[in-house]
Structures are given as C-alpha cells and as structure tokens.
Amino acid sequence: MSYVVNFDSVSTVGLESSPVADALAGLRANEARYFKNKYNHVFTVEPADEARPTVDWVSGILEQERGIVIAARPLEATEFEVEGIRMAYVFYQDGLSINVMYTLADAGKRAVGFKLSDGMEIPAELDAFKFARQKSKLAGTIRGSYFVIKNEY
C-alpha cells in the first residue's frame, strides 16, 4: 500500500521498526518537501517488498559501481521521473536513505546519494565516505555524501 509523505505533519507510518523512526520520518518528509517545492511532485513511497524492482535497481548500482552491499533491511522505496531525471529512493531500517539521480539524456548527471538520519552511526559499508552536515527543520542534522555513477543502468 502506497503512502503519500506529508511534510506538514511528519509521520512515522511505515518506519516504525527503525530505532531512529522519528529522525528517518523527518528525513523522508524533508525529501518530500524538496520535490514538492522544486518540481511540484507528490512524494509517494511503498513498502520495500512491493517496490522490489526499485530496491534491486539501487542495490545493483551500489554493488556494480563500488562493491557496496547494504546490510540494513529496506523499509520503503519510491521511483519516479521529473524533468527527464529518473529518481529512486530507498529508506532503510537503520536510518539510512539512499537515492539515485539518473538523468535519462546521454551525458547527463548521474549520482548516488547517501543521507544519514540524526542519531544513527555511519554504516560500516559506507565508512570510506566523507559526510557533510546539513540542518533541517524536519529532520534535525542530516549527514550526506554521494558518488558519481560511471556506467549505464
């Protein structure tokens, strides 16, 4: 069952099993607000089991590009297209959010982004990355990093 993320009233619906559910819900709401304001897109997520192709696509890119396998269990995912960019998000039980920005036009921007919820440790599989801090009214302190995708997916 899909869930439209509300950024006016942050809810932990679908994220209750996370030890940092409130912070992860704030992070998810922060993303929803960004896409509503920038693209007028309504950010809707599905349970990871129902969004298996999206989870598999993101996992495949991580493994093929950098040999990264995320240990945490995916809770929710979404995939959509805005202005010629294929976007995918996966929200994990430990508080991690991974997004893939994949411009459909040749030679466009393509990257994987990592965001850590407030209060979570950096997962061992991501300890090689440097994380910058960003303040958010919805999510507290967000730590983020990324890498550029080199191959075609």
Image (cartoon, helix red, strand yellow):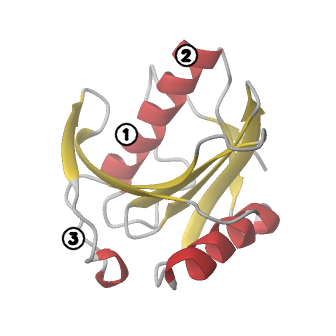
**Left or right: 128, with 148 as reference point:** left
Q: Residues within 10 Å of mark 1 (few under 14, many from 20)?
A: many
- Mark 2: amino acid: Lys
106 in relation to 96, above or below: above
> Which amino acid, mark 3?
Glu
Q: Which callout, 1 or 2, points at the residue further toward the start of the chain?
A: 1
Question: On the image, which quarter does residue 18 sit in?
Answer: bottom left
The span from disc 3 to disc 1 (Cα, nearest Å) is 17 Å
Q: Position of residue 49 (x, y in %)?
A: 75, 69
Q: Is residue 76 left or right of residue 32?
A: right
Q: Of residues 103 and 56, which is closer to you in this image?
A: 103
The residue at 50%/78% (across/down) is 66
User: Which label lies toward us, 1 or 2?
Assistant: 2
Q: Could you say which disc has been placed on residue 121 in the image?
A: 3
Sequence-wise first label, 3 or 1: 1
Residue 43 figure quarter: top right
Q: Position of residue 150 (x, y in %)?
A: 60, 63
The answer, for residue 95, to whether it is visible in the render is yes
Q: Secondary structure at mark 2?
A: helix
Disc 3 + disc 2, Cβ < 8 Å? no
Q: Secondary structure at mark 1?
A: helix
Please say whether residue 115 is visible from this viewpoint. no
Which element is circle 3 on?
A: loop
Quickly name the residue at label 1: 26
